[in-house]
Amino acid sequence: MFNIILIIFGELIIKIFTNNLFIEAYPLVVLNTTILALSVLLMGTDEVLIFKKETPFLLKSTIFQTLIIAAFGLLLIPKYGAVAAIFSLWMGSFTVLIASYLKRKYIYEFNFAENIVFPYVLAFHIIALLTYFSFNLEANILTILFVLTMTSHFVLMNKELLRSIVNNWVK
């Protein structure tokens, strides 16, 4: 949800804090939110690898991620600038995500939260790209659908917990 707030209010936040000085950075903020969204897929899952004493794998994957970011950065940044830097970070994060997923799948042979979270991350990437390329009406419609779907999913998954909270609050 923080990423959606950045997409919706990021331009206003930049205007307020920088007095329109860095307003041209707003599209970069939108693109950078995709990296944050991608990291949601990794949230809490690398702890499983640490528990299984797979820290050498985490070290190697982090070094590999750094090499990918550096390679893409060196190749693309001179020609494409800051957008290439964000793309480099995204590619590094995506590579580590895939490697971590495959390693966890090899160890446990079942998915954690990836199947639940992946559609939301994909939808968010679509929203961010539509916003970046100034398809604002489409992005706004998808944002509304995204928030409603995510909220409905949260309520359905946690209805017993929410019911007990409401009951305790009312008493």
Image (cartoon, helix red, strand yellow):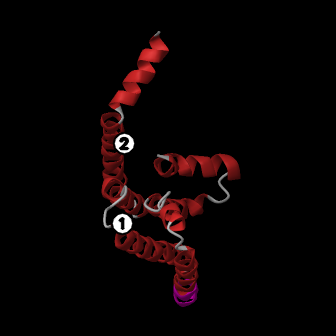
Disc assigned to residue 108: 1
The Cα–Cα distance between marks 1 and 2, rounded to whole angstroms, is: 32 Å
> Who comes first in sequence, dot 1 or dot 2?
1
> Is disc 1 surrounded by few (<14), some (14 to 19) or many (20+) residues within 10 Å?
few
Q: Where is residue 12 in the image (x, y as percent from the top left)?
A: 57, 46
**Nearest the eye: 103 or 2:** 103
Q: Position of residue 14 (x, y in %)?
A: 62, 52
| Residue 31 shows in the view | no
- Residue 51 vs 148, above or below: the answer is below
Disc assigned to residue 165: none
| Residue 95 shows in the view | yes
Identified by mark 1, the residue type is: Tyr
Q: Where is residue 125 in the image (x, y as percent from the top left)?
A: 38, 61
Residue at image location 60% in from the left, 58% down from the top:
23
Mark 1 secondary-structure assignment: helix
Residue at image location 50% in from the left, 77% down from the top:
92
Name the residue at the top extreme.
171
- Asked if the magenta segment contains residue 9, the reply would be no
Mark 2 secondary-structure assignment: helix
**Nearest the eye: 7 or 158:** 158
- Residue 95 vs 16, above or below: the answer is below
Mark 2 sits on what residue?
Answer: 147
- Residue 113 vs 88, above or below: the answer is above
* Main secondary-structure element of the magenta-colored stretch: helix
Identified by mark 2, the residue type is: Val
Q: In which quarter of the image is residue 117?
A: bottom left
Which stretch did the figure color magenta? 70-78
